[in-house]
Image (cartoon, rainbow, N blue to C red):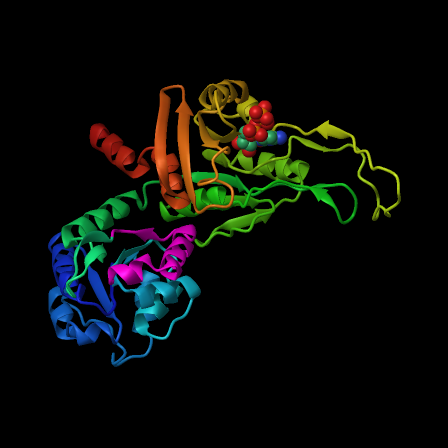
Amino acid sequence: MILVGVSGGVAAYKSCELVRLLVKAGREVQVVMTPAAERFVGPTTFSALSRRPALTEQSADVFPHLEASREAMLFCIAPAGANTIARLAHGEAPNVLTQSALAFTGPLLVAPAMNPRMWAAPVTQENVRALLARGVETIGPESGEMAEGEQGAGRMSEPDEIAGRIEARLATLGSLAGRRVLVTAGGTREPLDAVRYLGNRSSGRMGVAVADEAARRGADVTLILAAATASPSAPMRTLRAETAEQLRAATLEQADGADVIVMAAAVADYRPAQPVAGKRVKDAAAWTIELEATADVLAELGAGRREGQVLIGFAAEYGEGAVERARAKLKRKGADLIVMNDISRSDIGFDSSLNEIVLVSSKGEQLVSRRSKQACAGAILDTLGNQTARAAVEQRTTV
Ligand code: CTP
């Protein structure tokens, strides 16, 4: 079942067509409306089109919207007005639509629709970035003439475009069913003494996005998380690791049971050779620290992997010759795919919700242009193919 959320805005009339298209395509649709949406289109219209009562504040029972958000495979909010976007970004839930969205853990698609000045407002853009960072996908808005006569970006995308995006997203769900995916994410911390450490700038967002996306595609996911500001939104088994050595031990222990291993963690290449016991007391002398190399987990996995196991590594490269260095890493570490980030750019990567990656494999290179980290995660997992489709083909050929 698909949840279609309708918030207040003139574009609500286009949602009727969206619901009609989805139902015509054989989808079960449950509409949930904000009180403001009811000023534009009555719930009876949506109930008739979806062939089930639209959920509103007046719905007879108190919890059906929470039930629906548990059962739904996908939630699409169209139109999503500025107010609803702000509420989604901040976790406010004053109505049945925002409550169901807050309780929903699957893929959330929003099709913004509002006045161009409201869309361009820095606070709206900030809210949209917050949603993108959490894996929410946006559809549109388009530019054109608005109902109020103004020109600019803010028109809701057309219903067939939204329905197409919903179908494309649904096609990915379950594509990794039955596959066990192990993901490492975040940056390791190597102690200098009891309170200080050597760390790195990894937020863990990219790796967590891969773990989330794999879970949404039906994989059985284990996440090994080093220091990170990101945390997964889909339910999954999560283990913590602080140092490169702890991450290595946890990864090697879990690796046997994994069909796919994604090494997105920024693992320290060096650690203090002799961390100070307790806290080093400040004095006038310089503190010289000797660093020793850590074990390369990805290379170890590459050398010892079992037949059929897929190994994906990351490469944070700086400037010219990046792809060549990533290609060398692919060979040296025995991986099937290296996901390359150019860390010399400030508009993507470390502290951004956006990324641009190059997928480097023995087949060649594929540029995945700048998009949300969740969408990049989707592109990475697309390289694994569609297990369900493959199983279906195999089944067909054996009959
Ligand atoms: N990696 C690892 N163990 C390490 C260091 C890195 O498993 N001790 C993994 C990372 O998780 C990532 C990949 O190796 O998937 C690339 O990391 P990077 O630090 O770029 O590789 P290096 O070999 O250190 O590259 P360079 O020589 O350019 O520093």
Q: Is residue 52 above or below residue 194?
A: below
Residue 270 falls left or right of residue 385: right
Q: Which sits in the foreground, 211 or 12?
A: 12
Which quadrant is the C terminus positioned in?
Answer: top left
Residue 303: percent from left, percent from top: 56, 21
Question: Image quadrant of residue 378?
Answer: top left
Q: Is residue 173 visible?
A: yes
- The picture places residue 52, in percent across and down from the top left corner, at 17, 69
Work out whether residue 160 or residue 20 is closer to the camera in this orientation and state it. Answer: 160
Residue occupying the point 26% across, 51% down: 139
Q: Quadrant of ligand 1?
A: top right
In depth, the one of 232 and 289 nearer the eye is 289
Quarter-of-image position of residue 190: top right
**Which region is colored magenta?**
114-140
Q: Within the image, what quadrant is residue 357 found in?
A: top left
| Image coords of residue 330 (percent x, y) | 48, 22
Q: Is residue 294 above or below residue 193?
A: above
Residue beneath the point at 32% across and 79% down: 62
Task: Verify whether residue 139 appears in magenta.
Answer: yes
Apparent side of residue 318 relative to residue 107 in the rendered image (left or right): right
User: Does residue 71 sit above or below 63 in this rendering?
Assistant: above
Q: Say whether residue 359 is magenta.
A: no
**Quarter in which the N terminus is drawn:** bottom left
Q: Could you tell me if residue 309 is visible in this image?
A: no
Residue positioned 25% across, 68% down in the render: 7
Our reading of the magenta stretch's main secondary structure is: helix
